[in-house]
Image (cartoon, rainbow, N blue to C red):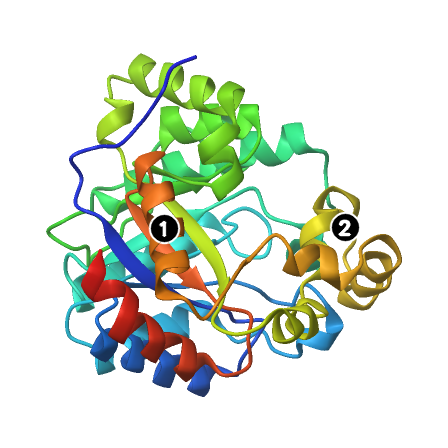
Amino acid sequence: MTLIGPTDHPLVVGYHCGSEQFAPNVLVDLAVHAEQAGFQGVTVSDHFHPWQDNQGHAGHAWTVLAAIGARTSSVLMGTGVTCPTFRVHPAQVAHAFATLGVLYPGRVFLGVGTGEAVNEAPFAPWPRYQERAERLVEAVQLIRELFTGDWVDADPAGRGYYPTRGARLYDTPAQPVPIYVAASGVRSASIAGAHGDGWITDPHTLRHGEAQIDAFAVAARGAGRDPGAMPKLVELWAVVGERVEAVEAARKWQFLMAFNDVVNIPDPREVQRTAEQLVEPERVADSWVVSRDPQVHIAAIRELAAAGATHIFLHSPQNDQRAAIDFYGAHVLPNL
């Protein structure tokens, strides 16, 4: 096993804006409040539909990021994550994030992944993973070429999915926007190592995914990168409160424990029905950090950092987000 382990990369603790969970204007206000509380970064989930119909929201993530940037001064910002292959062409992704990089230099990253049917299938045929992975690799390569500000004039026949000729981005940031690849499986982890500037994954994979960690490290070294120096981003699901509150909140997130059963379902109503049939909300709540004791939350963050996480984003499913933000600002962040 190729351990990643702790790195010398300074730990960033951020706040996750759940586009499925709250309206866009609320998310912007919460991001501002999070920066004021001491959080160093913000991620925004990039969805066209929510995962479950009862979540009730799905604002445009890039627009939300632009508004957050305008109302904050220093937080790191990025998507968690964008699918640059079906709903939007990779050139549109490159255009948007190059502009965000110009507006907020050094503060923006692009998180990408292979996507899920609930967001992509309404707009294009939904293929098997093999094609989705191939599309992601080609999309990342095209985005990087466009980020240079040079003309992209490759022979269209040389591109399998996104033939591009005579294209140029005229406004690009002096500091390129880093691209972080989301991965929880072995093949995707290999793509993250070979083609990403960093890895977005889940806490369980970072702590226990030996095969995924090996694949990431081997691919990164094969691409001339040091896997130990590459950022690793994870979300920490945490409720500042009691278990009864967590169980109630979990009714909007039951799909989490049935991901492989719902990832190919395009309708959020059907995702919700399937998740409710397969998973009890108590099971979901039991997978989260649920406590009013700051030490429990501090210990969870330290455990992830010890496993190699460099960026940890609080994702709180509870209704009262300000309570969670204020709790972390007063009792958790100062003690890390």
What amino acid type should be assigned to the residue bearing mark 2? Answer: Val
Q: Is residue 237 visible?
A: yes
Q: Are marks 1 and 2 in contact (CB under 8 Å)?
A: no
Give the number of the mark in front: 1 or 2: 1
Which residue is rendered at x = 31% and y = 58% of the image? Answer: 97
In this rendering, position of residue 107 left or right of residue 331? left
Q: To which residue does mark 1 refer?
A: 299
Of 315 and 155, nearer the camera is 315
In this rendering, position of residue 304 left or right of residue 288? left
**Residue at the right extreme of this rendering:** 277
Which residue is rendered at x = 17% and y = 63% of the image? Answer: 102
**In the displayed structure, would residue 139 be above or below residue 255?**
above
Of 65 and 176, nearer the camera is 65
SS under mark 2: helix
Residue 212, image x, y percentages: 50, 24
Residue 304, image x, y percentages: 37, 42
**In the displayed structure, would residue 323 be above or below residue 81?**
below
Dividing the image into 4 quarters, which one contains the C terminus? Answer: bottom left
Nearest to N terminus: mark 1 or mark 2: 2
Mark 2 crowdedness (10 Å alpha carbons): few <14, some 14-19, many ≥20: many
Q: Is residue 69 visible?
A: no
In this rendering, position of residue 275 left or right of residue 231? right
Dividing the image into 4 quarters, which one contains the N terminus? Answer: top left
- Answer with the quarter of the image where residue 134 lies: top right
Q: Residue 262 has which mark?
A: 2
Residue 206, image x, y percentages: 45, 34
Which residue is rendered at x = 21% and y = 56% of the image? Answer: 170
Mark 1 crowdedness (10 Å alpha carbons): few <14, some 14-19, many ≥20: few
What amino acid type should be assigned to the residue bearing mark 1? Answer: Ala
Q: Tell me how far mark 1 sits from mark 2, CA to CA.
A: 32 Å
- Answer with the quarter of the image where residue 74 lies: bottom left
Of 61 and 200, nearer the camera is 200
